[in-house]
Image (cartoon, rainbow, N blue to C red):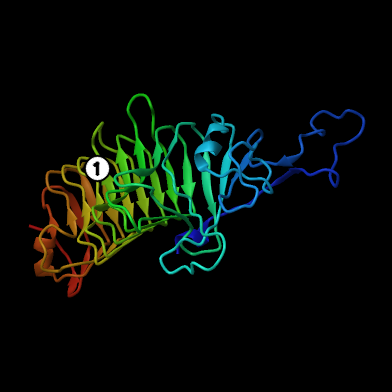
Amino acid sequence: MPATNVNWPTPLTRLNPWYPGQAGGVPGTDSETGLRLNTEGCIFWVDPNHVDAHDNRDGTNPTSPLRTVATALTKCEAYRGDTIAVMHNGLWTYGSPLVAHLNPIQESVTVNVPGVRIVGISSSSLGVPWVPAANNTTLITVNQLDVVIEGFCFWDYTYTGNIGIAVEWNSPPFGESCVIRHNYFYGLAYGITLDYSWNCYIEDCRFDTIGGCGIYNAAVYGDPDYTVIRNNVFTNSDAGINLEDSDSCLIEGNRFMDAGDAILLVNGDGNTIHGNTILGNPAGVNNFIDLTGGASNLVSGNWLACTIAQYDSTCSDATSGSWVHNMCTNGPTTAPPV
């Protein structure tokens, strides 16, 4: 499951009094006390369940953490290597209301500082629960470069119309080159929306019971070209990936289990769709891989839960590029779909 893959090392830079600086004024040895993940960056701790959690804190002491991610973001600086570490809570659909630490992350934040990492520190395979506080909100909006988000369970048990993560580029702000990995999206309208945000990387996430689409091109400002989507799972949702008009994307090694529409890249050019498995309605139309209107694409080595005859309906389009050795239930394909 996604959250089990979060890598959370906290390298030791200086921890007095056990490792004090050298005597004699040696440059660089009298480093500031504290843990670092970067030459300058700080770790800001967030835990709304902590007995001493307040948003008027510095946030760098884990025994006196901040209450909200929004406040932690105000303390981050551009490209300093700052990390926001968010502690676990028990607000899950099957969680016991009798246990402590039930206050979830329940806020909508905008990441407007480039080069920030937001990580959920969880003992769960799903990640740290993060839920909406109203209808039609976005839990995390990214409108700056080089942001990493990992280790969260974005889910909705009360409201409607919500989005997990939206990455937007609107010249300015510049939401681009975002890394979204090891997250779980459940019961939302949309898991991730991308809008003119190039070079995004989405890996090892699970999208379950998503009403609209797991990964979607919002297309208010433009198309999210050069996107990489690898090793994700889509299940029991209306649609998996819909990146209409997007170019030069890589969609590789994903698993679509009972997704209504798996991969839609209508009018997209120069994309590679390789090594995915698609389980869906074998009698459907354009619901497995749809490249209608596209050109110079490569569709190779995908495993499709339909017959070769059904492949001509579940997939489109013969003029969109090269369709190479895709496997159906009764053998490999030898030609593009008609």
Along the line of sight, the residue nearer the viewer: 124 or 46: 46
- Residue at point 56% right, 33% down? 76
Q: Answer whether residue 139 is visible to the viewer in this image.
A: yes
Furthest residue to the bottom? 330
Q: How many labels does the image show?
A: 1
Along the line of sight, the residue nearer the viewer: 90 or 206: 90
In the picture, measured across the screen, residue 139 lies left or right of residue 105, that is left
x and y percentages locating residue 100 in the rendered image: 57, 63
Q: Which amino acid does label 1 sit on?
A: Gly
Furthest residue to the right? 24
x and y percentages locating residue 132 in the rendered image: 38, 49
Q: Answer whether residue 336 is visible to the viewer in this image.
A: no
- Residue at point 49% right, 67% down? 97
Along the line of sight, the residue nearer the viewer: 252 or 113: 113
In the picture, measured across the screen, residue 183 lies left or right of residue 198, that is right
Regarding mark 1 in the picture, which secondary structure is present there?
Answer: loop
Quarter of the image where one finds residue 37: top right
Quarter of the image where one finds residue 175: top left
Furthest residue to the left? 338
Q: Is residue 113 above or below residue 211?
A: above
Q: How crowded is mark 1: few (under 14 residues within 10 Å), some or many (20 or more)?
A: some
x and y percentages locating residue 282 in the rendered image: 14, 69
Position of the C terminus, as image quadrant, is bottom left
Q: Name the residue tied to disc 1.
A: 270
In the picture, measured across the screen, residue 314 lies left or right of residue 89, that is left
- Residue at point 56% right, 63% down? 123
Position of the N terminus, as image quadrant, is bottom left
x and y percentages locating residue 120 in the rendered image: 52, 52
